[in-house]
Image: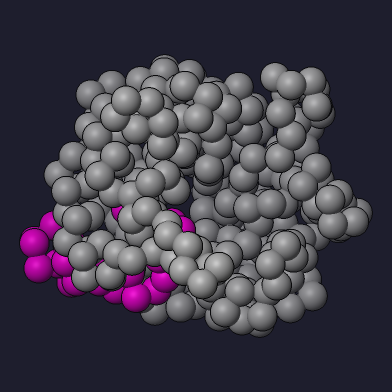
Amino acid sequence: MSKLSDLLAGKSLMLSDGAWGTQLMKRGLQPGQAPDPWNLDKPEPVRQVAKAYVDAGSNIILTNTFGGTRIQLARHNESARTAAINTAGVQISKQAAGSKAFVFASMGPCGKMMMMGEISADEVSAAFVEQANAIKAGGADGIVVESFTDLDEIELATRAAAATGLPVVASLTYDSGPDHTRTMMGTTPEQAAERLGPAGATIIGANCGIGIDNYILVARKYKAVWKGPIWIKANAGMPEMVNGKTTYNMKPEVFGQRALELVDAGATIVGGCCGTGPEFITALRTSLIKAGKLKA
């Protein structure tokens, strides 16, 4: 396994993992059910997801803590277990990773909009600080603040994560604007880099979105203004509704081939988001090795 210092210096190309929610649904998670409490109540299926990505070749895996703020957990009457849920989530992924992968714990949006007056910045910041501290207590190697569209909110999350002293990935979702390289709130990659670097981001990135095509453009825009590592986890194409279910039609092999363009555009950590699973990471790894961009 490459050294974390090489990753942070942008010297090593690394593979992240794929989607977690759909993998947990395959193991019994019901629609609308919060996945995070499974870290305490059903840890084995969570460990299986993490282990599947390690076995597929991921150098970095995430954690089942995306909705782990007190604010999100309160919707499911789980806020009293906030710290325990997050710490356990990291420990499960660490156990699965062993010495084969780093664990970067996931922190997602709080689910309420500051600009609409639904919650104050102080409340949001406090929730992120609590989650980040619980993640550090679990022994994470880094933190990923991901799937954000509000630049103000991700700045609060980034500052909270950086205060732990751990490396921080700040990842937004870009799917809007003329070339689909703006967030829903209108933020550009250039604006994100300008704000989030000083806030403590070690790595800048993008995840989810509408597929690889727009993230090739996003990676190029990041590379033009950001000297550190670039993290890209794209969806497996555009979702379609089939028999009432959301499906993604991009095949793992096609995803792996197209991801080569992400690397050429500047991405140094690549993985998948919605619609991807361990088979996508295996295909991605195979493609990168064949292209001489990754060592076997």
227 w.r.t. 286: above or below: above
Q: Quadrant of residue 288?
A: bottom left
Q: Is residue 187 magenta?
A: no
**Residue 176 visible in this rendered orientation of the protein:** yes
Q: How is the image coloured?
A: one colour
Q: Residue at x 39, y 73 (%)?
A: 278
Residue 5 relative to residue 118: left or right: left
Residue at x 58%, y 51% (from the top left corner)? 106
Q: Which residues are magenta?
A: 270-296
Residue 196, given in percent of the width and then of the height, sits at 48, 24
- The percent position of residue 50, horizontal first and vertical second, equals 52, 72
Rendered view: 152 above or below 130: above
Relative vertical location of residue 16 with respect to residue 196 in this rendering, above or below: below
Instruction: Name the residue: 39% across, 79% down.
Output: 55
Queried whether the magenta region covers residue 274, the answer comes back as: yes
Q: Position of residue 276 (x, y in %)?
A: 40, 65
Q: Can you say whether 150 is above or below 269 in the image?
A: above
**Direction from residue 157 to residue 102 in the image, left or right:** left
Quadrant of the rendered image containing residue 46: bottom right
Q: Quadrant of the N terminus?
A: bottom left
